[in-house]
Image (tube, rainbow, N blue to C red):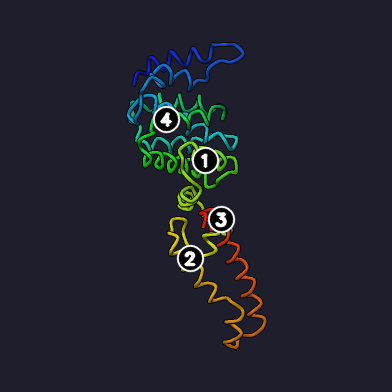
Amino acid sequence: MSWELITKELSAATAQTGARRPTLVERLLRAFGFGQGVSGHSTVAFTIALVSLSAKLAKSDGVALRVESDVFERLHRIAPGERDNVRRIFDLAARDVAGFESCADSIATLLRHDAKLMRDVLDGLFHIATADGILHPQEERHLKLAAAAFDIGEVEFRAIRALFIEDPDDPYTVLGLTPSVDNAKLKARFRELVRKYHPDSLMGRGMREDYVAVASAKLATINAAYEKIARERGL
């Protein structure tokens, strides 16, 4: 990577004044040919956009922690000789969250032929967001923005999220499933739970009224969870 050119653009971006000055990331991407037909994950433009996107996600909860940049470096195997330069871009990009969506859009453009790698990028962002053990609401909001830019739908987003966050109110958790379950297994599980907790079935087996009342409340929760998933999936 041409760190001399990056340093030059960093200095120019900092010094420039005006009503609408290009962001640091915009200047760097332009300097390395973004928008001129470049594409792929091996380009300098991709590295710049990825570092910046990760840094701005780290800042979205109010403070970018060193543990988050450390996670980024481990995930992307930053060579020891490049660590200081990468940290410089990370720290500068982490000054604010402005330009997050622009970075995500840039990565989506560069990886437009590689949906799997875009999913891997989102997976890496989740690693960074949860590095401090907490997923802040603003971090989740930015993760959803990145997913939208990468054309990753709600079901797949939930599947990735479930790898990092245990949410007792999540409808999949209520049904004892993961977001990656297919529609056939989802429906079969729902029917199984309805049979298990339906009041008529329980009373027919001689269950006590108090137990039946608890089961009825459970069934209402199961129905609500299934209906939410069904709406999301268009079932």
Q: Find residue 144 and report its horizontal and vertical position in percent.
A: 53, 41
Q: Find residue 57 and report its horizontal and vertical position in percent.
A: 52, 35
Dot 2 or dot 1, earlier in sequence: 1
Q: Which residue is mark 2?
A: 187
Dot 3 or dot 2, earlier in sequence: 2
Q: Which residue is mark 4?
A: 109
Q: Which residue is mark 3?
A: 231
- Secondary element type, mark 3: helix
Q: Is residue 213 above or below residue 82?
A: below
Q: Is residue 212 above or below residue 177?
A: below
- Secondary element type, mark 2: helix
The CA distance from mark 2 to mark 4 is: 37 Å
Q: Residues within 10 Å of mark 2 (few under 14, many from 20)?
A: some
Q: Quadrant of the N terminus?
A: top left
Dot 2 or dot 4, earlier in sequence: 4
- Secondary element type, mark 4: helix
Q: Residues within 10 Å of mark 3 (few under 14, many from 20)?
A: few
Q: Amino acid at mark 1?
A: Leu
Q: Amino acid at mark 3?
A: Arg
In this rendering, the count of numbered labels is: 4
Q: Find residue 209 and report its horizontal and vertical position in percent.
A: 67, 83
Q: Nearer the viewer, residue 183 or 125?
A: 183
Q: Which residue is mark 1?
A: 143
- Viewer-side label of 3, 1: 3
Is 117 on the left-hand or right-hand side of 162? left
Dot 3 or dot 4, earlier in sequence: 4
Q: Find residue 192 and report its horizontal and vertical position in percent.
A: 49, 73
The CA distance from mark 3 to mark 1 is: 22 Å
- Viewer-side label of 3, 4: 3
Q: Amino acid at mark 4?
A: Thr
- Viewer-side label of 2, 4: 2
